């Protein structure tokens, strides 16, 4: 094994995560793919594994800086920042951290739905500002239990969301590329048809070019004035400009969003909307889940460097 086989890449790593990786294998560190070019040649030549955390593009040009690179172990289930085709063409394996975060992301989706429908942000302010004592009851809001929901993408997280909403006695509809085995949920072959049939549309797709604007302007329009968009996937999966137009013009009822284009510098139009609940991409952000993700990433690095089968390969 080379002297320093591991590169830890990502300003978002917590000190303890970095320490654990660097404690397992001799490691160098950069803040992001844009700093890889400045690593000294000798060090780059020995790197065999990269532990990556972040959303900045990691493409062919960066991969070609490391002649011995064999694995990119991503922290997160979504690996849309990594050019997987370029990695495969170079026989570089990519791994991610599926399943261990599905519960948390599903919890946040349900939390966004409840907070949006029940005006919980307004309610919180109603208490804090003293309006409750001065003016009495806050405006009535909207019943969530028993309503119709459409899940766009019935993958690992989508299914966890659907299971939770079934317990809320909701009528579950979904769209995936093919019909799946379910306890009787209604399948829709296209997203516009799904949106027409439901009031809450929850997006749980992968990100990346293939799902860009998958929830189109037509789908948003089809939701109608009682429609609420919940997105915990990636900002790219929904036509964000069309969503903002619809929210501003009251053509849909609201949105609950954990993901956006250009995070964290999101479109300022979101900040002026009264009918949204916004979260800073914190779907998997619990101590327990982030620990499990870090462990799985390290396991993938360790498996590769020891010549063992990878735990969770994606290519
Ligand atoms: P998954 O099990 O792979 O599910 C992905 C879903 O995307 C599936 O329903 C799949 O459709 C659909 N899909 C994939 N490629 C597609 C394509 N080309 N066209 C249309 N649909 C496509 O992934 P997961 O574990 O549920 O994670 C889903 C996503 O959640 C991640 O990729 C990530 O972007 C996001 N996420 C967000 C957070 C957060 O903090 N907010 C945290 C973790 C993950 P089929 O059902 O047809 O196979």
Image (cartoon, grey):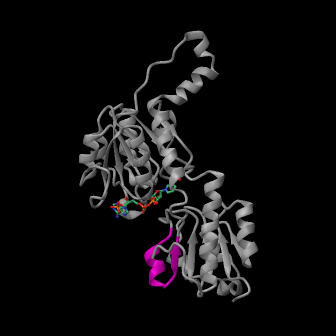
In the image, residue 153 sits, relative to residue 249, either above or below, namely: below
As drawn, 168 above or below 141 = below
Task: For residue 46, say whether it is visible.
Answer: yes
Give the quarter the ligand 1 occupies: bottom left
Outermost residue to the front? 183
Give the residue at x 60% y 62%: 293
Whether 90 is among the magenta residues is yes
For image coordinates 70% across by 84% down, the residue present is 43
Task: Report whether residue 52 is seen.
Answer: no
Which residue appears farthest toward the bottom when viewing the image?
A: 1
Residue depicted at x 68% and y 85%: 41
Residue 212: x and y, percent? 37, 58
Number of numbered discs visible in the structure rendering: 0
- The residue nearer to you, when weighing 20 against 81, is 20
Residue 297 in the image: x percent, y percent? 60, 69
25 and 220: which one is in front? 25
Along the line of sight, which residue is nearer the eye, 247 or 233?
233
Residue 58 location, x and y as percent? 53, 70
**Magenta residues, as a range?**
82-95
Q: Is residue 144 left or right of residue 81?
A: left
Whole-percent x, y for residue 221 in the image: 28, 40
- Quadrant of the frame with the C terminus: bottom left
For image coordinates 55% across by 60% down, the residue present is 100
Judge left or right: residue 30 versus residue 214: right
- Magenta stretch: includes residue 40: no
Looking at the rendering, in which quadrant would you find the N terminus? bottom right
């Amino acid at each position: 094994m080379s002297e320093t086989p591991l590169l830890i890449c990502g300003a978002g790593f917590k000190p303890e995560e970095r320490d654990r990786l660097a404690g397992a294998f001799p490691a160098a560190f950069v803040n992001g793919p844009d700093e890889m070019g400045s690593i000294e040649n000798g060090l780059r030549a020995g790197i065999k594994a990269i532990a990556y955390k972040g959303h900045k593009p990691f493409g062919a040009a960066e991969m070609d800086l490391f002649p011995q690179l064999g694995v990119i172990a991503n922290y997160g289930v979504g690996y849309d920042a990594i050019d997987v085709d370029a990695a495969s063409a170079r026989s570089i394996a990519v791994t991610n951290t599926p399943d261990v975060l599905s519960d948390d992301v599903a919890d946040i989706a349900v939390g966004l739905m409840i907070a949006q429908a029940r005006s919980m942000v307004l309610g919180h302010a109603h208490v804090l500002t003293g309006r409750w004592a001065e003016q009495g009851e806050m405006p009535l809001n909207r019943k969530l239990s028993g309503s119709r929901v459409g899940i766009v993408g019935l993958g690992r997280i989508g299914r966890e969301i659907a299971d939770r909403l079934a317990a809320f006695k909701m009528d579950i509809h979904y769209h995936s590329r093919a019909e799946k085995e379910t306890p009787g949920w209604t399948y829709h072959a296209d997203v516009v048809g799904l949106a027409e049939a439901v009031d809450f549309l929850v997006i749980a797709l992968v990100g990346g070019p293939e799902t860009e604007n998958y929830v189109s302007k037509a789908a948003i329009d089809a939701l109608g004035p009682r429609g609420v968009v919940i997105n915990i996937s990636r900002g790219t999966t929904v036509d964000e400009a069309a969503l903002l137009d619809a929210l501003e013009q009251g053509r849909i009822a609201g949105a609950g969003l954990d993901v956006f284009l250009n995070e964290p510098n999101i479109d300022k139009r979101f900040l002026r909307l009264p009918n949204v609940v916004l979260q800073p991409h914190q779907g998997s952000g619990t101590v327990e889940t982030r620990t499990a993700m870090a462990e799985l990433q390290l396991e993938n690095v360790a498996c590769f460097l020891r010549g063992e089968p990878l735990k969770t390969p994606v290519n």
